[in-house]
Image (tube, grey):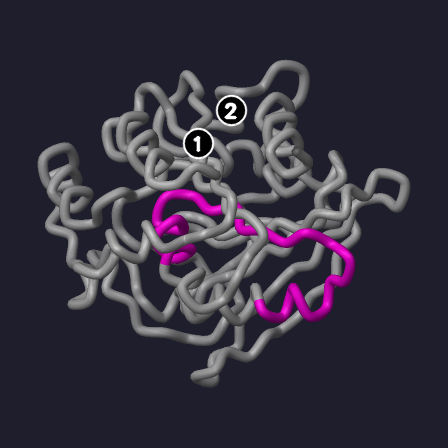
Amino acid sequence: MKNILLVFVLLFSLDCYAIKPVREYVATPDSLGMNYEQQVIKTADGYLINTWVIKPAAGKDKKTTLVLTYADSGNMSYWLYHIKALSDNGFTVIAYDYRGFGKSSDFEINPLNLYYNEFATDLQSVLGWTKKNIKGNRTGVLAFSMGTIVATLALQHEKADFLIGEGYVYDPPAYVAKIKVLKDRDIVLPKVAGNYTSQLKRIKCDMLLVSGEKDEFTTVEESEKIAQQRSNRETLKHSGNHTEGFMAMTKDSFGDMYVKELLRFTHR
């Protein structure tokens, strides 16, 4: 089972650059030795969002919660190795599936959309539930690629203590243009995407922007531009490609050097 899961980690470390939900889970957290609770959270517009709550061992608890907001394909089970690396090092992890993904409510999806504004509603609901029910922790969002757009929109309405984003999208129209050049795909943007740049500047919480030196889609330079917008933002570079940070920053165990940086950032 572990070898199968690792294959999925490798396959889905890079986005499909088109929304590709998967309904069936490849595994659940207990398959990797993690205790978890399943929660179903209802959004303001009536959708049910399937959620896993994974807490660390009592002696390792860092009193810090990460709401995992993944990229544009698969479902939360494809991120189990990431979740385990975080949980083993003391983070509480709240993983969830967007509507239309995994066991969350049905939602009609055009795979050529870059994202849906409704995904931000899903994150708002999960983040609000988390702050209400996981007491005594600092609570932040860990977002990847499309998930960074979702986080940017959600944090206009629901506060977090910090935001960590890998493969951070700086300018959606420019990102779509890159996908056309590099992947020859005609990606569609929501009508209100033009507000994104100003929304990104308005995020007040601490931000860590993680970027791969080989990433042509969300470049190191773009992450540095985002970081320069406010004094409480910083960048972290790795040697890999788009969303390959955990693999690129592995020394002795999966993502160990990556997690070390997250611990440094969240416990300054």
Query: What's under tag 2, amino acid-wise?
Result: Met
Give the answer, above or below, for where 101 lies relative to 246: below
What residue is rendered at 63% in x and 56% in y? 94
Where is residue 9 drawn, in percent x and y? 51, 36
Which quarter of the picture shows residue 250?
Answer: top right
Residue occupying the point 43% across, 22% down = 237
Within the magenta stretch, is there residue 235?
Answer: no
Q: Secondary structure at mark 1?
A: strand
Query: Who is closer to the viewer here, 225 or 44?
Result: 225
- Residue drawn at x 29%, y 67% is 109
Name the residue beneath numbered marker 2: 247
| Res. 11 visible in picture | no
Q: Which residues are magenta?
A: 128-152
Mark 2 secondary-structure assignment: helix
Classed neighbour count for the residue bearing mark 1: other residues with Cα under 10 Å, few (<14), some (14–19), many (≥20):
many
Q: Position of residue 261 (x, y in %)?
A: 60, 27
Q: Residue at x 39, y 29 (%)?
A: 211
Q: Which mark is residue 159?
A: none
Q: Compared with residue 160, is residue 107 higher up or lower down, i.e. above or below?
A: below
Identify which residue, 8 or 228, lies in the foreground: 228
Q: Is residue 153 left or right of residue 105?
A: left
What crowding class fits label 2: few (fewer than 14 Cα within 10 Å), some (14-19), or many (20 or more)? many
Residue identified by numbered label 1: 210
